[in-house]
Amino acid sequence: MVAVSAFVSFLSLAASAVSAFQCQSAPVIGADELVLLTSNVYTPFSYQLNRPDAAYLSLHFASVNIPVGGLLTISSPDGLQFHEYTNVTQTNFYAEFIDGDSAFITYTPPRSSLIDSLLANDAPNAFLIDKFAHGFPKADLDSQVEAICGKDDSQSAVCLKTSDAPKYQKAQAVARLRINGRSLCTGWLFGSEGHLITNNHCIRNANDASNTQFEFGAECTTCETIPGGTCKGVTVATSSELLYTNPANDFTLVKLKLANGASLASYGYLQARASGPVLGEPIYIAQHPGGKPKRIATIVDSGAVGTIESISIPSFGYTLDTEGGSSGSPVLSAKDNAVVALHNCGGCLNGGVKISKVIKDLTAANLVPKDALAGGSTSAPITTTVTPVTTSVAPVTTSVAPVTTSVAPVTTKSPVTPTPTGPVSDCNGCKGCYSKVLVACFPLGYTQAQCASFTGFQTIWCGN
């Protein structure tokens, strides 16, 4: 009876520790502002966008349709930061951000005949910018959910490059995510075909997936602690396809839509242990806490290796350090370097979702990526020649309550379209603001008064 009593007491203690976890939305570091900028494919365009005191600017494109020979450029005033688009068609995405409070947008049309120029008024749009995200001038980390337990014992990833090469190597598959231009999380490559996992509270739906930037290799060359957003890596994709999301288990699986010329080969990928974590086993977390360059947490304040300290049916706890923006990070076993959980909560204990719950969901949906399971018959371990890479997260958190387990999982194969349509007379199917000049629906978000103000675009309010 004594043994049974002790066991019951242990379960009670573990349950209490797990129940202390606090989980909520991705940290918010910026906000959107509406704007309307456009040009047809034959008309040159130049504009300087200013937002005083902004930490960064990220333009949102309702559409881009740059013809062969045309060139759209977004650049910083000094020209040191720039992003170019040519011979590309894409809708509903945020451009890579420009640090600072000013950005130049220029469009140079292809060389065209005199007839093309004369017909310019009837030409299709080269681009339509409907809003932009701007970074808050000062991040507020005081209310973040993920927590540093005591002093921060995590290290810049590069510090482990030679002293603990296996952990550093695995961390190359971890990415910094910028969602909707204004919030940050962490994610990681799952399997060998370009799939990535993060939390549902980071990417909740297809629109979030379509508007997320994925940055690998965001790590510095020294062990010095660097502020968030610095030591840029490579943004391999500015959009992704939502494949599966489950609010109850707080995870989302996406497939990256790689930019032209982008490759994931140098980053490797992670594999999951289907059986999940074991109480007491040593673990480490590769992450982008607070939007910082990649860091790896391996030890606690005492200097001991971090371990699984409590466990329950859906989740477990540990005191390895995390911060706002660490959400979506992989929790890996130090024994076999397999992912055993998905970090999603803070509070000291910090907490995560057992990866076995994730695998169970994806197996039922027939969506387990190739080479995603450690020890599987088709699994292939990552080689030791992978080059460094990282991911990111962000400051200011919100007070959104954790998602209850009563929410049903959602599976989808295509992103949500940015503009709903419907049989409204003279509105060409729009349910908000419609432009006769653009022959297009404005993205949702404009009010009736804002719609009416764009008189030069012959706008019609369609009653939503």
Image: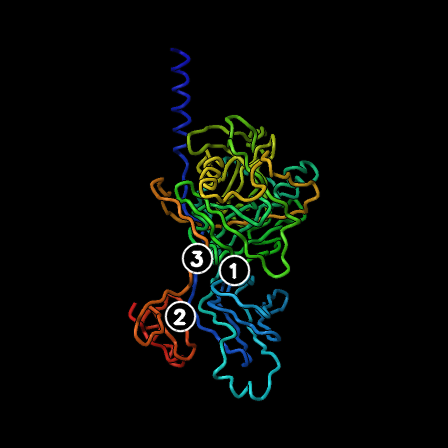
Q: Pointer 1: what residue?
A: 55
Please name the residue shown 51% across and 40% down the image: 322
Instruction: Please tell me whether residue 343 is drawn above or below residue 103 in the rendered image.
Output: above
Mark 1 / mark 3, whichever is N-terminal: 1
Amino acid type, label 3: Asn
Residue at horizontal 42 percent and vertical 68 percent from the top = 34
Name the amino acid type tagged 1.
Ala
State the residue position of label 3. Answer: 207
Disc assigned to residue 442: 2
Circle on res. 5: none
Which SS class for mark 2? loop
Nearer to us in this view, 426 or 167: 426
Q: Secondary structure at mark 3?
A: helix
The furthest residue to the top: 1
- Badge 3: how crowded within 10 Å, few (<14), some, or many (20+)? many
Residue 174 drawn above or below residue 91 = above
The residue lying at 62 percent from left, 54 percent from top is 233
In the image, residue 279 lies at what x, y percent? 50, 26
Residue 374 sits in which quadrant?
top right
